[in-house]
Image (cartoon, rainbow, N blue to C red):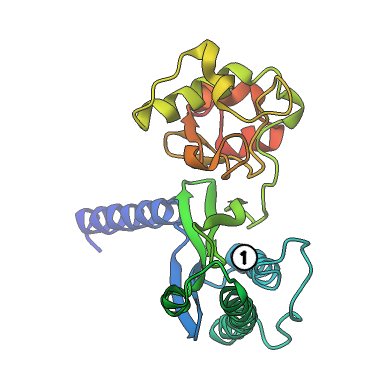
């Protein structure tokens, strides 16, 4: 082979090797498949909107397994204040995602359907027995029986080279004046092996992190068009003590920083909504666990 031709072949081979290496080292995105289901009864409606990893590698399989555990834990205790299960876990092949989710849709819809039927019956009896309600109004009240609603949501909300985050955030209305948000909150996974990172913020440092929490809550109220002075923040919150607690839902990493989300009634009235805000990583770094620092890559950003 001519020297010039050999050089061309060598250059082409080296270039191909570099391209291959570059592709293999590129960040792997956790592709997801969306599953949506819905069912209804006479006085209830249940829906499911679920993202699950589409691939079946070791990390993705581990993430999927955890998300299915969350699905079982949340839906088997649907509408329960005491946390008891209403039906047994799925005992089929968990690799059959549609069968798995279909089982929980059917079971959850059955529970909500039965409870809504009982609620409607009790409401009707109460209305008919109430002598203070004019007869002409009773029929109208019975005709406007509220529907129970449960919307189950498990969605991918954040991702970078190191982590992927899914959010368990459901809506439930059991025939009342308004519904509420329930669920497990953010579930953060290490993309390297699919393990869940349960503790990103060091909860022993709640006193030290107070300035960041105050600043974040001020920004939340300001964005809602309700400016609050720093020394007045606690006057607008419902706290057991002087300290603002960390949210029960574990904060999660995002492109702009660590996201804090408080549930309804957790630190404020229902009218205040769900106070949430994002703290830049450099600011929150001193309050993270070693696990959280490693996952987010503090110092490498």
* Rendering coords of residue 195 (x, y %): 67, 55
Residue in front for this viewpoint, 275 or 55: 275
186 left or right of 91 in image = left
Is 132 in front, or is 103? 132
> At 77% from the left edge and 63% from the top edge, which residue is drawn?
83
- The answer to whether any part of residue 289 appears in the image is yes
Q: Is residue 152 above or below residue 205?
A: below
Q: Quarter-wise, where is residue 265 in the image? A: top right
- In percent of width and height, residue 37 lies at 46, 79
Query: Residue 66 sits in which quadrant?
Result: bottom right
- Callout 1: few (<14), some (14-19), or many (20+) C-alpha neighbours within 10 Å? many
Horizontally, residue 175 falls left or right of residue 15, namely right
Position of 263 compared to 198: left or right?
left
Residue 82 screen position, x and y as percent: 78, 62
Name above or below for residue 1 compared with residue 162. Answer: below
Residue at 70%, 83% in the rendered image = 90
- The residue that disc 1 covers is 67
């Amino acid at each position: 082979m001519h020297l010039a031709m050999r050089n061309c072949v060598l250059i082409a081979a080296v270039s191909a090797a570099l391209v291959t290496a570059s592709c293999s080292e590129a960040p792997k995105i956790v592709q997801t498949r969306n599953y949506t289901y819905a069912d209804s009864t006479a006085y209830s409606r249940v829906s499911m909107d679920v993202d699950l990893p589409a691939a079946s590698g070791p990390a993705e399989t581990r993430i999927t397994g955890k998300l299915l555990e969350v699905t079982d834990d949340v839906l088997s205790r649907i509408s329960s204040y005491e946390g008891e299960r209403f039906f047994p876990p799925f005992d089929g092949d968990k690799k059959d995602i549609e069968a798995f989710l279909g089982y929980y849709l059917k079971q959850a819809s059955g529970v909500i359907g039965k409870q809504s039927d009982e609620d409607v019956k009790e409401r009707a009896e109460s209305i008919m027995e109430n002598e203070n309600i004019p007869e002409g109004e009773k029929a109208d009240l019975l005709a406007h029986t509220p529907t129970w609603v449960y919307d189950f949501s498990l969605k991918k909300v954040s991702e970078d080279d190191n982590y992927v985050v899914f959010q368990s955030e459901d809506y439930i209305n059991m025939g009342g004046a308004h519904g509420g948000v329930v669920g497990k909150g953010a579930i953060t996974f290490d993309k390297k092996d699919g393990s869940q990172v349960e503790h990103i913020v060091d909860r022993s440092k709640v006193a030290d992190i107070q300035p960041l929490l105050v600043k974040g809550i001020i920004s939340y109220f300001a964005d809602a068009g309700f400016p609050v002075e720093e020394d007045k923040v606690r006057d607008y919150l419902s706290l057991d003590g002087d300290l603002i607690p960390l949210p029960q839902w574990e904060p999660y990493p995002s492109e702009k920083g660590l996201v804090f989300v408080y549930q309804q009634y957790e630190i404020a009235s229902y009218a205040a909504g769900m106070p949430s805000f994002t703290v830049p990583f450099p600011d929150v770094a001193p309050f993270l666990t070693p696990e959280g620092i490693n996952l987010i890559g503090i110092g490498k950003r």
